[in-house]
Amino acid sequence: MPNTTWPTLPQPKSGSTLDMSTLSKTDNSKVTVTSLLKLKQAGEKFTMLTAYDASFAAVIDQAGVDIILVGDSLGMVIQGRDSTVPVKVEDILYHARCVSNVCQRSMIMADMPFMSFRDVPRALENATRFMQEGGAHAVKLEGGGHVLPVVEALAKYGIPVCAHLGLQPQYVNKLGGYRVQGRDEPSAKRMLQEAKTMQDSGADMLLLECVPAGLAELISQSLTIPTIGIGAGVDCDAQVLVLYDLLGISFGKVPKFAKDFLVETGSIQTAVKAYVKAVKAGTFPATEHTFN
Ligand code: KIV
């Protein structure tokens, strides 16, 4: 039975004083788009992990994960829906607030749910709510060339953006399932081109989901902004996992790219730290988690 001791939660930010004496100077400095860019330039990998509530967010923050993604995967892992499509702006807002109430160091990224960024005014309004009401520092959005005007507008107004290419789960009803993307030459070339245009339009990061490792490596080398991979091989600048996959409690089919770190470590805290260490050392993802 794993040791499930609860983390010591920092006090809510409003009107509280935190004991920062246990945090080193480096641990204490907030993660920003600039600090992540510097890591890429220095060839150092960083980490992202999903969280949807205060307790897990505190563990993840204290374990040194750089970005906490309040992902629309909450539709599946929290709400038990069969896709991310039903997730609403209010759902992301609620969970972003839970996470941001306790985080000290990690950057908080809010996922823009299905149809919440279908035109520029709507995208600006919803992203503003994620930042002002949800406490997010950045947003992520799925989509190719057609979302460029949105990326550009968000960037112009000072909202850090993570673009999301490769498998885009919000398109599951069009795709007919969750499949690796960019396997043939025309689609690989298109993805590389879209990645460059996302960067040119002002994206600060690019998430690549279920992409052959060689293509993800080429995209990562071709961009100056960091890439964050999930099922995209070890050569991305960073990695992301859904928290419950890392804890071995994914229900249904376990994705090939997932790894249960809890089974090897015995506590949630050490499992998250082991993930951070493995990503930074380049030992996760391994070949068995990778598509070729
Ligand atoms: O919503 C989410 O958790 C995501 C990850 C799978 C990257 O987008």
Image: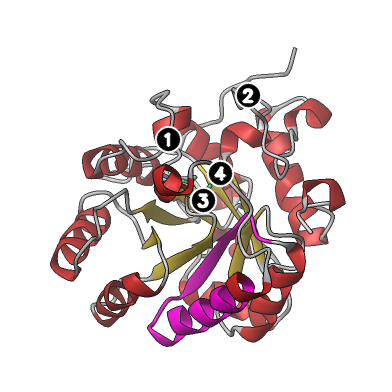
Q: How has the structure been colored for display?
A: secondary structure
Question: Disc 4 versus disc 2: distance between alpha carbons?
Answer: 19 Å
| Residue 225 seen anywhere in this rendered image of the structure | yes
Question: Disc 2 versus disc 3: distance between alpha carbons?
Answer: 32 Å
The label on residue 83 is: 1
Mark 4 residue crowding within 10 angstroms, few (<14) / some (14–19) / many (20+): few
Q: Nearer the viewer, residue 74 or 36?
A: 74
Which residue type does callout 3 highlight?
Met
As helix, strand or loop, the secondary structure at mark 3 comes to: helix
Instruction: Identify residue for label 3.
Output: 20
Q: Which residues are magenta?
A: 188-211
For the point 30% across and 36% down, the residue is 86
State if disc 2 and disc 1 touch (CB < 8 Å): no
* Of callouts 3 and 4, the N-terminal one: 3
Question: Disc 1 versus disc 3: distance between alpha carbons?
Answer: 40 Å
| Mark whose residue sits in front, 1 or 2 | 1
* Of callouts 2 and 3, the N-terminal one: 3
As helix, strand or loop, the secondary structure at mark 1 comes to: loop
Instruction: Identify residue for label 4.
Output: 178
As helix, strand or loop, the secondary structure at mark 2 comes to: loop
| Mark whose residue sits in front, 2 or 3 | 2
Which residue type does callout 1 highlight?
Ser
Question: Disc 1 versus disc 2: distance between alpha carbons?
Answer: 17 Å
State if disc 2 and disc 4 touch (CB < 8 Å): no
* Of callouts 4 and 1, the N-terminal one: 1
